[in-house]
Amino acid sequence: MLVYAFLYLPIAWLALVSFNSSRSVSQFTGFSLQWYAELLDDDRVLQALDLTLRLAVTSALVCTVLGTLAAFGLRRAFRGRSVWAMLLTLPMVVPEVVMGVSLLAFCVKLAGIPLGFFALLVAHVSFSLSFVVVVVRARLSGMDPRLEEAAADLGAGPFTAFRTVTWPLVLPAVGAGAAFAFLLSFDDVVTSNYLGGVGSTTLPVYVYGQASKRGVSPEIVALSTGMVAVSALLLVVGVVIASRRARRASSSVMEVVGVPQGG
């Protein structure tokens, strides 16, 4: 209970203060929605949120496609596979400051990529791709190859076996990898601070800049509370969908083995 209190009481206090009528974040004086109204009227926040969502979604899509293909490619044995696997997972252990400086030098000096959305996309794909590869590859390594062999023995072609056997089994890992890529891109501060450029400030960089310049203002508290609420809502939706799928799968198994639904 002490551990949970240490983790969640600051978030609960943050949510309470976001409805405070006073600018003070140390004491609650009254209920008000003025900070949320001012937040919705702030064009800089809305622009930063729009850029962050577009960047996170695009980065997640690119990382999911490339990471899934790379995981399937590393499933087969070939010369130099261990080297490729090490190179794909190396960004996970490289310090983020080093990653940001190196990507800044690459984009500006070598590739000639102007700072902005595309430079941010290259950077976010670079450090998010490893997580998709690791998650999907772990799922593939845990799959029983006899399932695909059984599908081939029953007359399924390579595409049919992949569509009906392999892909449904690996799909949860692909979804988890996409979620990792989205959250890593949405939450990044250090690399985005290097490669954002003028007019390309992401929401975490904006929050960090405002907090470091002006302190923890009520608008930043309201913004942080909104981000926590959206994350919690997505978590609840994911748990509900997973539980419904589990119940449907259990019902299907009981129907196959002839167990009554109520027994």
Image (spheres, grey):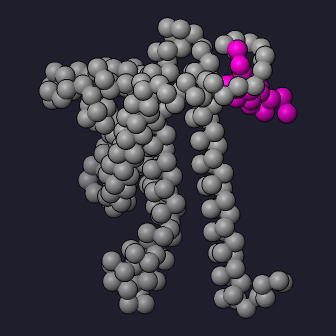
Residue 67: x and y, percent?
36, 51
From the viewer's side, name the closer residue of 214 and 87. Answer: 214
Residue 74 can be seen in this image = no
Q: Which residues are magenta?
A: 1-22
Residue 74 shown left or right of residue 141 in the figure: left
- Image quadrant holding the N terminus, namely top right
Residue drawn where x is 46% and y is 50% of the image = 177
In the displayed structure, would residue 75 be above or below residue 228?
below
Which residue is located at x 66 percent, y 56 percent? 239
Q: Is residue 87 left or right of residue 20?
A: left
- Where on the picture, by quarter, is residue 174? bottom left
Looking at the picture, tell me which residue is in the foreground, 10 or 152: 10
Determine which quarter of the picture holds residue 228. Answer: top right
Q: Nearer the viewer, residue 186 or 203?
A: 203
- Residue 197 coordinates in the image, percent (x, y): 29, 21
Q: Where's the C terminus, which quadrant?
A: bottom right
Give coordinates of residue 98: x percent, y percent.
36, 21
- Does residue 186 sit above or below 141 in this rendering? above
Does 191 sit above or below residue 91? Answer: above
Magenta stretch: residue 179 in it? no
Report the magenta stretch's main SS: helix
Q: Is residue 158 visible?
A: yes
Q: Is residue 20 magenta?
A: yes
Asked whether, in this view, residue 126 is left or right of residue 228, the answer is left
Point 42% across, 40% down: residue: 53
Q: Nearer the viewer, residue 174 or 234?
A: 234
Task: Give the residue at x 49% y 40%.
Answer: 183
Q: Which quarter of the picture shows residue 47?
A: top left
